[in-house]
Image (cartoon, coloured by chain):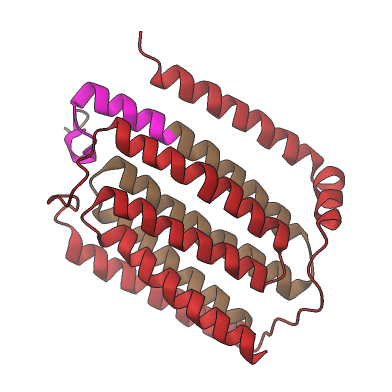
Amino acid sequence: MLLNQFLILAAILFGIGMYGVLVRRNGVLVLMSVELMLNAVNLNLIAFSARLQETSGQVFSLFVITIAAAEVGVGLAIILLLYRNFRSPDLDEVHQMKG
Amino acid sequence: MVAQNVAFGILALAMVLAAIGVVRTQNVVHAALYLVVVLAGAAAQYILLAAEFVAWVQVLIYIGAVVILFLFGIMLTRAPMGDLEGLNNRQGLPAVVATLALIGTLTALLVDAFSDQEIVLDAPTPTADIATQVFKVYVVPFEAVSILLLAALVGAIVLARRD
C-alpha cells in the first residue's frame, strides 16, 4: 500500500468537511462536518504511524479522539443555548454582533 | 497486498460518498447516519493499517458516544424529521470552488512529497505498546487531556442547565 493513498483520502475528507462547515446553516450539521475534518486528521496520523513503524502517531490520534469528544459536548451545549435563546438552530440568525 | 488495496478502494469510495451525503442531504437524521458510515469506514481503515486499538476506540467513542450525542442534539433542537429545505446557505458555489482548490492543492503537494513512500506492515501494533507510550512518554499530556475532558463536561452542564 502506498502512503499517499491514505493521505489523499484524508485530504478529500478534509475538503468535504470544510465544504460542510462553509455551507451548512444548522449548528448540529456544522459540528458533524467538523467531525469529518478531525477524522481526516486522525487518518493521517495513523497512516504516518504505520509508515514510520512508530506508535506515537496512534497515541496522538487517541488524544485527538478525546478532544473531539470534549468539543462535541461543549459545542452541542452552546447550540442548545442558542436554540433556547433564538428558537432556531440556524447559525445565520446569530448576527447581533454584526456592525 | 492486492487484497489490501481492493479493501482500501471499496472503503475509500464508501467513505467519500457518505461524507458527501453528510454535507449534502436535506434530512438531519440521515446526515447523522451517513456520519456513522464515514466513522465506521475510518475504523476499518485503521484496522487495515494494523492499528487495532485505535480502531476499537473509534468504534466505541465515535459511533457509540458522539453519534448518540448528535442524535440527542437533533432531538433537543427539535429539527424536523422529514426532508426540509434551507439546510444550506447560499454560499454553495464559492464553497465548492474553495473545497476543490483545497483538495487540489493538498493532492498536488502530497504527490510531490510522498509519492515514493510505501507502507510495509508486518504485525498489528500490540495494545501494550500503546499503553507503555501513553503512561510513560506521554503521561503529562494524558493527564492534561483528562483535566480538559472534565472541564469540558462541567462546562457543558453549566451551559445547558436551565435556571
Q: Image check: B101 left or right of B118?
A: left
Q: Which residues are magenta?
A: A75-95
Q: Image check: B76 left or right of B42?
A: left
Q: Residue furthest top?
A: B163
Residue A13, position in %: x, y?
43, 66
Q: Is residue B33 magenta?
A: no
**Residue A21 in sight here:** no
Q: Residue furthest bottom?
A: B2
Residue B121 sits in quarter: bottom right
Rendered residue at 54%/46% (across/down): B64
Q: Is residue B145 above or below residue A23?
A: above
Instruction: Identify by letter the chain in brown.
Output: A
Rendered residue at 14%/50% (across/down): B84
Rendered residue at 33%/28% (across/down): A80
Q: Main secondary structure of the magenta part?
A: helix
Residue B52, position in %: x, y?
71, 62
Pick the front one: A13 or B30: B30
Instruction: Identify by letter the chain in red.
Output: B
Q: Image check: B87 left or right of B38?
A: left
Q: Is residue B75 above or below residue B125?
A: above
Q: Is residue B107 above or below residue A94?
A: below
Residue B31 sits in quarter: bottom left
Residue B115, position in %: x, y?
59, 87
**Residue B24 in sight here:** yes
Q: How many marks?
A: 0
Rendered residue at 59%/86% (across/down): B5
| Picture quarter with the C terminus of chain B | top left
Q: Is residue A82 magenta?
A: yes
Q: Is residue B130 above or below residue B18?
A: above
| Picture quarter with the N terminus of chain B | bottom right
Pick the front one: B22 or A31: B22
Residue A38, position in %: x, y?
50, 54
